[in-house]
Amino acid sequence: MWPFRTKQKNETPLFFSNTLSGKKDLFVPLATGRATLYSCGPTVYGAQHVGNLRAAVFADSVSRALKEAGYSVRRVINITDVGHLVGDGDEGEDKMAVGARAEKTTPEEIAKRYTDRYLSDIRSLNLDTTDIHFPRASEYIAEQISMIETLEMKGFAYRTDDGIYFDTALFPSYGKLGNVRDVEQRAGTRVSTSGKKDPRDFALWRFAGPNDLQQWESPWGTGNPGWSIECSAMARSLLGDTIDVHTGGQDHISVHHNNEIAQSEATTGKPLARYWLHNAFLTIEGAKISKSVGNVHTLADVTERGFHPLALRYFLLQAHYRTPLSFSWEALTAANDALSRLWKLANEIKRESGGRARASDMSLRLRSIFLDDLATPQALGLLWEALKEDSLTSGEKWGVIEAADAILGLSLTNAPETSRQALSDLPEDLQAIAVEREEARQAKDFARADELRIHLLKRGYAVEDTPSGPLFTTSER
């Protein structure tokens, strides 16, 4: 195991909405001053969309809260490069094989390509990856096999024609996470019962099929691991039998995370995690983000439209992590404009205060709000309130900015320099485009107005619509 590196501070109360207990719980770590955090990461068969990135920003907020509360944090985000089938159950082809065939390459090549892209994306969203371990499922095959052997020895595993399965009937508390006890409640569960004792049973090891591009030798023959066993094996290997906090998307509750709990706790006889936290979906016009629907947007799409990557982070933080959030380019435009104004204010206050912070009730309230179950919308609201409060000195405002930056991660203490310009300050060719955009907006031709706004953004000018007309903001990225 690698050492805890975050400097320890005095521990302060921290609360999380715990899916396991069904209520908001005070966080109490297993070890004084230390916390372990495991987050379900990407399946790297393609680029991650903005919905996937919500989970990354959410997990980062959990880490920031733990550190802000005074804990040294050891983090793991897994990289799934084998075992995740297209249906999230036990049928279909491995997603890595599907991705490899689509791009006419190997699973290993697309795993590297999209792991690198994922890491680049989350760094652009201001996640510090220095102290995060990113294990690949394919690197922990031996540990997965070892766990399956233990489960088999204890009588929890049985063999069918296509693999080794976990016998959920022998784990009476199966489905306790989210209180998902029945098959009918398990959203997304569309698995064949052929060869299984119970439709809830899940694959620990799959025997090699004709379309499997990745195969390993095992005591049961050539094959590959089931999806859920990887997280159990890697969490145990890197963080121990019991971890403090496990995060993931709410879609993982019914199947993936209940599977993890069952196989881990059957193996060790100990709780897998004490706090389970789940973020709600990010949707587009009320629909789940899906390639088949054609509404998949990536961070590259965001930046190609001229938005700063942290505009997406600001947009995500405007909703509580347990609240569904609908993505649109209009909403992202508003977030980008708000972030630009925030950076401008931060730079002004930095100059006025000389970068010297003073404590205030506002900075203490901001921290307290955030530590109450990651209340990021309220934290943003209080930040804006503080920066507009005339009774606060510039030093006190800078103290609020420093506190906000630690918990929100919006680069407030090192903000890009921005300047606001009038229409007449723009280059002549862009003035014509800006005028055409305003005419389209007044005519409610919002598609054309958005197209022209994107053109201006790509030339380095964000448009801010004000009662007295549009203003144009430039920034150094």
Image: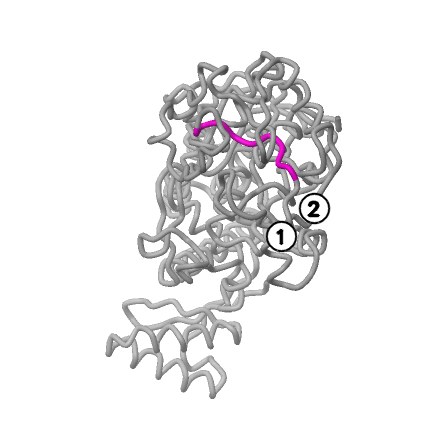
Question: In front: 348, or 98?
Answer: 98
Crowd around label 1: few <14 · some 14–19 · many ≥20 (10 Å): many
- Residue 221 x %, y %: 71, 33
Q: Are marks 2 and 1 in contact (CB under 8 Å)?
A: yes
* Residue type, numbered disc 1: Ala
Rendered residue at 50%/31% (across/down): 195
Q: Is residue 337 left or right of residue 124?
A: left
- Residue 413 location in percent, x, y? 57, 48
Magenta-tinted stretch: 199-207
Q: In front here: 476 or 216? A: 216
Residue wearing tag 2: 214
72 or 208: which is nearer to us? Answer: 208
Residue under the image location 42 percent in, 31 percent down: 254
Image quadrant containing the C terminus: bottom right
On the image, the x and y values in percent for residue 12 come to 51, 20
In-front residue for pair 277/435: 277
**What residue sits right under mark 1 in the picture?**
97
Where is 37 relative to 436, above or below? above
